[in-house]
């Protein structure tokens, strides 16, 4: 496994402290998207969506998404947090009047983690924000296919939306493929719901291990050549709820039929949780932006960069 060096671009420092914990930074970033000159982030223990301009180094801004207040106690907060784990960029016009949109998805790992957020940038600081009830569909997934359901990534792949499930215990890492048009139709409704009968296809993916600990998906980003780049972490846990010691992260390439090709080990000390990636022509290099989660509320998440060389 080849090593990959990453570069720190910035810490996710906030313009204003969060309403829930009074932090001046995002500490558990879990999803990343790049859209129209901005970075957008989600965190797995916050109620907001976060964003900043790519140019410059102004503090990150918070966009209210879910109302309420989360406990500051870590155990109590974990029990009730919405657990946003992925952020997918939807095509322009697919949902809202020739505009692109973002879909922040929950893990689905408990009954409290079933609400997604649809975000449509309207220009300047204005955004249209809508809740999406995912409980009918995600509950069916848990009951019929993946009892340890833990959605960690989401990406659009042509006519499909692909969710990345992190395998734990007897549950495999897997791609959950949905018909994109069916999802978009639901998102255009006045009260969006992912219905119980939404069709899906499962594709298991064998990621292997790192330092003797099984790797599990943390995010994915579709590339223009039919591959996708994934991030995965080696976390010592046997269920979708409890955290475990993280011994390292990797980035790797795979195809939608579940075949993994080259995998790169990220330098120690970083748990990669969210990805944005672009395949550059004609060089063949893949330029990556990623966010980290330190699993420590006292430490800020980081935005980091890497360049993966062209295929040999």
Image (cartoon, helix red, strand yellow):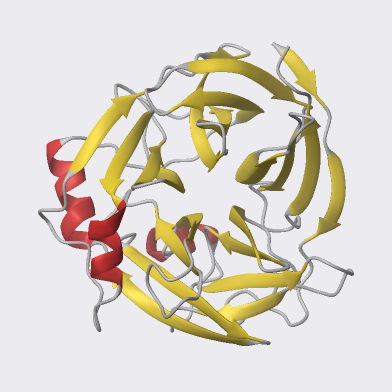
| Quadrant in the picture for residue 19 | bottom right
Left or right of 301 on screen, residue 43: left
| Quadrant in the picture for residue 145 | top left
Viewer-closest of 128 and 310 = 310
Q: Look at 85% across and 57% down and name the residue there.
A: 10
- Height in image: 231 above or below 310? below
- Height in image: 139 above or below 195? above
Quadrant occupied by the C terminus: top right
| Residue 236 in view (yes/no) | no
Q: Look at 74% across and 71% down and name the residue there.
A: 52
Place of residue 21 in the rendered image (x, y in percent of width and height, measured from the top left): 62, 74
- Height in image: 59 above or below 126? above
Left or right of 194 on screen, residue 116: right
Place of residue 218 in the rendered image (x, y in percent of width and height, measured from the top left): 53, 39
User: Outermost residue toward the front?
Assistant: 282
Left or right of 259 on screen, residue 137: left
Q: Look at 59% across and 31% down and name the residue there.
A: 245
Tally the marks: 0
Q: Look at 48% across and 80% down and name the residue there.
A: 69
Place of residue 103 in the rendered image (x, y in percent of width and height, measured from the top left): 44, 64
Viewer-closest of 279 and 183 = 279
Quadrant occupied by the N terminus: top right
| Residue 215 in view (yes/no) | yes
- Height in image: 112 above or below 295? below
Place of residue 49 in the rendered image (x, y in percent of width and height, measured from the top left): 56, 71
């Amino acid at each position: 496994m080849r090593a990959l060096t990453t570069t720190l671009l910035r810490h996710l420092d906030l313009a204003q402290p969060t309403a829930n914990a009074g932090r001046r930074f995002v500490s558990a970033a879990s999803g990343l998207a790049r859209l129209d000159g901005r970075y957008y982030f989600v965190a797995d223990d916050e109620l907001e969506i976060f964003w900043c301009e790519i140019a410059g180094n102004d503090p990150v801004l918070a966009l209210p998404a879910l109302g309420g207040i989360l406990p500051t106690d870590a155990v109590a907060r974990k029990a009730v947090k919405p657990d946003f784990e992925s952020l997918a960029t939807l095509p322009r016009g697919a949902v809202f009047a020739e505009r692109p949109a973002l879909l922040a998805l929950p893990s689905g790992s408990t009954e409290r983690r079933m609400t997604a957020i649809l975000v449509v940038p309207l220009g300047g600081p204005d955004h249209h924000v809508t809740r999406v009830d995912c409980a009918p569909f995600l509950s069916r997934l848990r009951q019929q296919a993946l009892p340890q359901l833990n959605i960690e990534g989401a990406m659009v792949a042509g006519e499909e939306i692909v969710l990345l499930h992190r395998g734990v215990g007897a549950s495999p890492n897997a791609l959950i493929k949905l018909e994109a048009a069916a999802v978009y139709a639901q998102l255009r409704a006045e009260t969006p719901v992912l219905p119980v009968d939404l069709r899906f296809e499962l594709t298991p993916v064998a990621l292997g291990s790192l330092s003797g600990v099984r790797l599990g998906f943390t995010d994915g980003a579709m590339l223009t050549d039919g591959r996708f780049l994934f991030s995965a972490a080696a976390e010592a846990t046997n269920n979708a709820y409890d955290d475990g010691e993280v011994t390292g992260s990797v980035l790797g390439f795979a195809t939608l039929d579940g075949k993994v090709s080259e995998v790169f080990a990220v330098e120690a000390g970083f748990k990669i949780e969210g990805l944005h990636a672009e395949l550059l022509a004609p060089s063949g290099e893949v330029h990556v932006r990623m966010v980290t989660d330190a699993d420590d509320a006292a430490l800020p998440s980081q935005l980091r960069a890497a360049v993966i060389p062209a295929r040999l």
